[in-house]
Image (cartoon, helix red, strand yellow):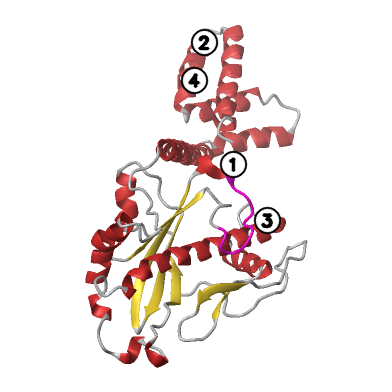
């Protein structure tokens, strides 16, 4: 489905502290089944959409206008690449299915209709076959994927667009100077191609476009299948970060299970200590030792100290008992505090 707001929600979002621009930019992309072009959401509409979906993340309000400008620029550049593919459809040798005498794809006077964008859909969690192949070859995964449906003379053609981020080029990024600026944003790489939904798309990707480029008749620049050394290193770094995050999550799960075991199994000595302290006037050392021993016995790295403590209690070695109690308490505290 089209992922532009159906209604112009220009009111400030809940919790928003600064007003954002409500100006909407008119795209150069023709809108299917109309004589108009698409209109981009304003920064306020864009911010509201993210807030409504819970996807604001750490984006500050003042960043909305920059994000929208980049978003619009990427869409225009995507359309520019689609038009380069659509050039093939105007060549009889490249598009046999479009050479019929049907008037459906013709305007009055025999002129060919321009391609239009009917609809588009974000598919950020669906890895395209080509993106999967690039991943196998060491390329990072795309940060987003779109499917655009283009209407071409009565025929619908699906295009797949993978958006990649090259962190090594981020320092060279600048604010786009205009909608069709193809040079300011260097870190976002576009992989635009017709989906392999029919014979024309297969021929276009395998033969027609390569032949046109070889003859110097197309300026289309395909994204390399193999990653650059910088992108390969970026992939390794991302995998290492994912591994560390997974380990941290696993450790947190273990810690939560351990805390539950301590609460469940040491409830009795805890209540006994609380009762002794609430009544007052008595020595609660015995209850405190019992609680510390119970907690330490639940923790693998601390449990051996409990056995040592009982051994020295039998021998009445008070100095060693005091030391072991301190060690046990420290071990328990470190186990939980080190994972906060």
**Disc 2 or disc 1, which is closer to the eye?**
1
Foreground of the two, 302 or 150 = 150
The earlier-in-sequence mark between 1 and 4 is: 1
167 left or right of 156 in image: right
User: Which comes before the other along the chain, label 3 or label 1?
Assistant: 3
**Residue highlighted by disc 4:** 306
Image location (x, y in percent) of residue 110: 37, 89
Q: Residues within 10 Å of mark 4 (few under 14, many from 20)?
A: some
Secondary element at tag 3:
helix
- Which mark lies nearer to you, 3 or 2? 3
Q: CA distance from mark 3 to mark 4?
A: 56 Å
The residue at which mark 2 appears reads as 312
N-terminal-most mark, 3 or 4: 3
Q: Which residues are magenta?
A: 172-181
Which residue, given by chain and number where applicable, does mark 3 sit on?
Answer: 63
- C-beta proximity under 8 Å, tags 4 and 2: no
Mark 3 vs mark 2, CA separation in Å: 64 Å
State the image coordinates of residue 239 (x, y, percent, origin top left): 41, 39
The rendered magenta stretch, by its main secondary structure, is classed as: loop
């Amino acid at each position: 489905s089209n992922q532009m707001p159906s209604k112009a929600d220009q009111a400030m979002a809940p919790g928003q502290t600064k007003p954002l621009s409500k100006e909407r930019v008119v795209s150069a992309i023709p809108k299917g089944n109309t004589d108009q072009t698409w209109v981009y959401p304003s920064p306020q509409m864009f911010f509201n959409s993210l807030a409504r979906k819970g996807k604001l993340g750490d984006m500050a309000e003042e960043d909305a206008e920059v994000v929208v400008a980049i978003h619009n620029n990427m869409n225009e550049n995507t359309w520019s690449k689609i038009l380069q593919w659509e050039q093939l459809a105007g060549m009889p040798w490249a598009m046999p299915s479009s050479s019929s005498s049907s008037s459906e794809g013709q305007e009055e006077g025999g002129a060919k209709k321009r391609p239009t964008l009917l609809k588009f859909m974000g598919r950020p969690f669906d890895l395209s076959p080509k993106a999967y192949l690039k991943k196998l070859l060491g390329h990072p995964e795309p940060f987003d994927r779109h499917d655009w449906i283009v209407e071409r003379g009565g025929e619908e053609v699906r295009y797949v667009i993978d958006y990649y981020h090259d962190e090594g080029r981020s320092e060279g990024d600048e604010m786009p100077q205009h909608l069709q600026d193809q040079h300011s944003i260097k870190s976002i790489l576009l992989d635009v191609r017709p989906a392999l939904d029919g014979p024309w798309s297969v021929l276009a990707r395998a033969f027609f476009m390569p032949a046109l480029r070889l003859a110097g008749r197309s300026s289309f620049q395909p994204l390399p299948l193999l990653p650059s050394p910088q992108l390969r290193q970026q992939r390794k770094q991302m995998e290492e970060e994912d591994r560390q995050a997974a380990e941290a999550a696993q450790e947190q799960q273990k810690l939560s299970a351990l805390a539950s075991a301590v609460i469940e199994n040491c409830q009795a000595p805890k209540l006994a200590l609380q009762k002794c302290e609430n009544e007052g006037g008595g020595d609660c050392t015995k209850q405190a030792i019992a609680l510390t021993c119970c907690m330490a016995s639940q923790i693998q790295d601390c449990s051996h100290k409990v056995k040592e403590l009982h051994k020295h209690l039998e021998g009445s070695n008070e100095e060693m008992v005091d030391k072991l109690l301190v060690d046990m308490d420290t071990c328990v505290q470190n186990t939980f505090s080190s994972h906060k």
